[in-house]
Amino acid sequence: DAGVIQSPRHEVTEMGQEVTLRCKPISGHNSLFWYRQTMMRGLELLIYFNNNVPIDDSGMPEDRFSAKMPNASFSTLKIQPSEPRDSAVYFCASSLGDWDTIYFGEGSWLTVV
Amino acid sequence: GIQVEQSPPDLILQEGANSTLRCNFSDSVNNLQWFHQNPWGQLINLFYIPSGTKQNGRLSATTVATERYSLLYISSSQTTDSGVYFCAVERRGTYKYIFGTGTRLKVLA
């Protein structure tokens, strides 16, 4: 199995630009998570999808952040406009069901200057 | 919300030593997982362990849900064990895994 695939692996962008992060979950998994990791706040859950439906987006920091899952094999996390404080590693993860092992992608390292 | 505390925050071991990492949580949980984040940032699942004991090679984990803690044992540590160990708990009915602050482990050759 290819695992959870994220792109881009690294992105450097200027403040105010739109950023789109992409994720392909493991085939057959019906739960998808977006996490953000920073030194100050650790690993935070941003949003959780089940069967392509957003179940809990209470962790999305503000309206500048949005996430979609148009089908079972693809999800995006968009930041518009980006700010320097959005600099972090963004992880996508998937699991077979609500109560199963979570598998993480390698992360997208975002730097906003 | 639920609090997840891990101890110790930092640990330095000589290769071959054993160690125990602890995860305490403040509320009843449905599920608990242990992860290892290697020095390259990859997060690898070690155990899915809502209760009981599991072993995988040199690693084993025990969760006592009624007493709200879990332990991760590393035996005969190797330099490749270095990194940060996280526990993550899912509070009953929320489907949200909350991560602890991690234990940073460094194994010296």
Image (cartoon, rainbow, N blue to C red):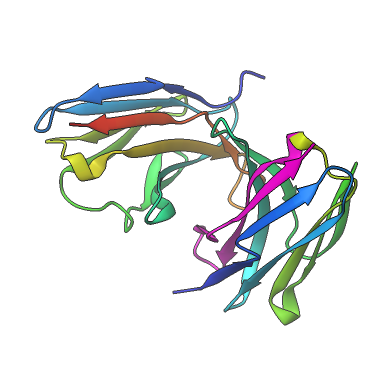
Residue A22 x/y as whole percent: 37, 25
Q: Quadrant of residue A29?
A: top right
Q: Nearer the viewer, residue A23 or B17?
A: B17
Q: Looking at the image, which residue is at 62% across and 36% down?
A: B38
Residue sitting farthest toward the left:
A16
Residue A96 x/y as whole percent: 62, 39
**Start-end of magenta stretch:** B80-109
Q: Predominant secondary structure in magenta?
A: strand
Q: Quadrant of residue B65?
A: bottom right
Q: Looking at the image, which residue is at 61% across and 45% down?
A: A97
Is residue B91 magenta-colored?
yes
Q: Looking at the image, which residue is at 31% across and 31% down?
A: A110
In the displayed structure image, the side of residue B67 where residue B57 appears, left or right: right
Residue B6 x/y as whole percent: 62, 66
Is residue B76 magenta-colored?
no
Q: Nearer the viewer, residue B77 or A28?
A: B77
In the picture shown, does residue B14 fall above or below A59?
A: above
In the displayed structure image, the side of residue A70 where residue A33 appears, left or right: right
In the displayed structure image, the side of residue B69 where residue B103 appears, left or right: left
In the picture shown, does residue A7 fall above or below A53?
A: above
In the picture shown, does residue B30 fall above or below B85?
A: below
Q: Quadrant of the C terminus of chain B?
A: top right
Q: Looking at the image, which residue is at 41% across and 21% down?
A: A9
Residue B81 x/y as whole percent: 74, 40
Count of all numbered marks drawn on residues in the image:
0
Q: Quadrant of the N terminus of chain B?
A: bottom left
In the picture shown, does residue A82 fall above or below B46?
A: above
